[in-house]
Each structure stands twice: as C-alpha cells, then as structure tokens.
Image (spheres, rainbow, N blue to C red):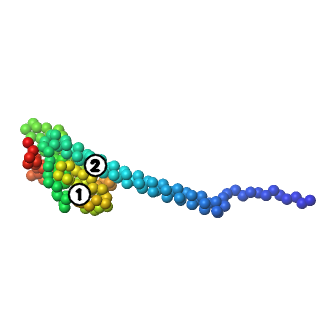
Amino acid sequence: MFRTSPVKHQRGYSLPEIMVTIAIVGVLAGIALVSFGNVGDATRLAQAENIVAQLNGALRGFGQGNWDIRTAKDDGSTTDEFKVLRSLQYKPAASAGRFDSGAPYYPPSWNPAASNATTQYRVRWNGRNFQLLVPGTAGTGLLLPFDSSDQTAPYTFPSNFTPEPPAANAN
C-alpha cells in the first residue's frame, strides 16, 4: 500500500477573508467618523453658548458695580458689540484711593474679528445683552473661531477711552 504523508495546513488568511475583514473595519470606521463629527458640532455649540454666558455674566457684573449698559443695537455692523465688549474689558486707573474690584469684567486678551459669515458661530448685541448666532443664521457679530486665534495680546485702550455711558433712563 501506498503511504501518503500528512497534509500540512498552511497558516494565514485567504484573500477573501482579508477583504471581508477590511470591508467590515471600513464600515465601522465610517460609522464612528459620522458619530464623532456630530460630537464636534455639539462641542462647538456648547463652547459658543459658554462664551455668550460669560459675556452676559460680565455684563451683569459691570451693571452691579457701575451702571447698566443699554446701547442701541446695530444689526448691520459690529460697532455696538465692540463698544460693549471694550467697556467690559476696560480697567480704569485707580483714582483717589478708589479700587475697581470687578474690572476688567471680561479678559482683555479676547480680540475677536467681526463677521457676517452664516457658516460660523457669532455673538451679537441685542441692545440689552449678547446673543448667539448659530451657523445658518444671518447677521453680523463677533466671530467665534474655536482655534484660539481670537486670544491675543490684551487690547490697548486709547488714552481718551471711556466706557459705554449709562443708559439715558438709568438712575
């Protein structure tokens, strides 16, 4: 009788097995990327809402320590936003023993650009407080870029700078 040698099984994977594995990993990666993309959008929204809350908190602090800022809104430009922001960032020189404990009410290193790009998050002044403009909303406001490009050296105030004056009907 003939004696046959035992068949050796080769170790490894066949080409179809590798292709199926790569396809499954690709589908799972695609699902994960879509999920992470939505997380990024939610994170940017939360950051933008936080900045608006901080600005409005600084506005309340300024109002408690000084006067309420009631500047007319101007939806066509960012002049009103910058007037209010710079008032919150201003720290007057101490005069005659007076200490301004709350000033500045908002960090003077935040120097945003003006923008009307409807693809970006922006902050707009509505006459009483700041509000968030989300992507897809028309309007001009202070740009929130989320890349720290708006964090620069502190704003240098001109020597004749005065904060936004009290509202005409304020006591």
Residue 158 x/y as whole percent: 13, 53
Mark found first going from the N terminus, 2 or 1:
2
Numbered tag placed on residue 43 in the rendering: none
The quadrant of the picture occupied by the C terminus is top left
Answer with left or right where residue 170 lies relative to residue 2.
left
Residue 32 x/y as whole percent: 48, 54
**In the rendered image, which residue does mark 1 sit on?**
141
Residue 24 x/y as whole percent: 57, 58
The quadrant of the picture occupied by the N terminus is bottom right
- Tell me, yes or no, if residue 168 can be seen here: yes
Numbered tag placed on residue 51 in the rendering: 2
What is the three-letter code of the residue carrying label 2? Ile
Residue at the image point whose x is 52% and y is 56% from the top: 28
Residue 18 found in image quarter: bottom right
What is the three-letter code of the residue carrying label 1? Gly
Residue at the image point whose x is 83% and y is 58% from the top: 5
Answer with left or right where residue 32 lies relative to residue 161.
right
Against 20, is 68 above or below? above
Residue 14 x/y as whole percent: 66, 61
Answer with left or right where residue 7 lies relative to residue 13.
right
Residue at the image point whose x is 27% and y is 55% from the top: 133
How far apart are the alpha carbons under marks 2 and 1? 13 Å
Against 100, is 29 above or below? below
Of residues 119 and 7, the one nearer the viewer is 119
Residue at the image point whose x is 26% and y is 46% from the top: 53
Classify mark 2: residues with Cα within 10 Å, few (<14), some (14-19) or many (20+). Answer: some
Classify mark 1: residues with Cα within 10 Å, few (<14), some (14-19) or many (20+). Answer: many
Most extreme residue toward the top is 97
